[in-house]
Image (spheres, grey):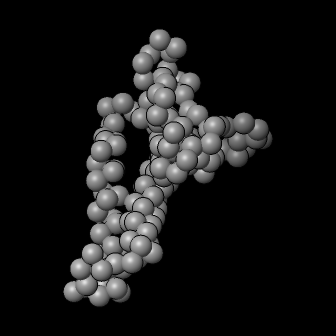
Amino acid sequence: MKCAVCSREARGFGYFNAALSRTDPRRYSDRWVFCSMRCMQPFARVMEHLTRVQEDAVLDPSDLELAALRAALAPLGDYVASLGMDRPLADYRKEDVLRLVEVVVDAYQAHMLDEHERMAAKDRAFFTQRLAAQPQPTTGANPRIPF
Ligand SMILES: [Zn+2]
């Protein structure tokens, strides 16, 4: 099984959406496994956010994957340029090809992780702002009452 965020090997970190009832099919997916807390926590925050604001649920995993693939283009181009643009792929040594794959996979994973962390941060900022906007409770002495 691969980590749902970064595609590294998953290591026993599973997620289910505790906010949904046990009979809700969106509560659990066997794809929601992770390599680390670092990958699972932002995912959990995004899922919890989506549960709270279903009408704003614009997160499309396939869009995320496409954006991550696009993010790999520039590093791929840089690497190919470093080997020589005119060099045919058939002339690459095995190490060159392995490095090429690594450059693409690293860029893809870094983008996926950044996106998940960015969404989690946005979610946090939203709720921090909502909390700050709430009126302060008027406990204790009220300075407007002069006694
Ligand atoms: Zn991961």
Query: Foreground residue, 141 or 76?
Result: 76
Q: Is residue 124 above or below residue 67?
A: above
Q: How many marks?
A: 0
Q: Name the residue located 54 percent from the left edge and 28 percent from the top edge.
A: 16
Q: Position of residue 85 (x, y in %)?
A: 25, 85
Q: Quadrant of residue 96?
A: bottom left
Q: Position of residue 30 (x, y in %)?
A: 49, 29
Q: Is residue 131 above or below residue 107?
A: above
Q: Name the residue located 23 percent from the left edge and 80 percent from the top edge.
A: 88
Q: Is residue 76 above or below residue 119?
A: below
**Quick check: 129 left or right of 82?**
right
Q: Quadrant of residue 62?
A: top left
Q: Quadrant of the C terminus?
A: top right
**Quick check: 86 left or right of 125?**
left
* Residue 61 visible within the image: yes
Q: Name the residue located 22 percent from the left edge and 86 percent from the top edge.
A: 86
* Residue 111 visible within the image: no
Query: Foreground residue, 57 or 95?
Result: 95
**Quick check: 14 left or right of 93?**
right
Query: Foreground residue, 37 or 35?
Result: 35
Q: Name the residue located 36 percent from the left edge and 74 percent from the top edge.
A: 75
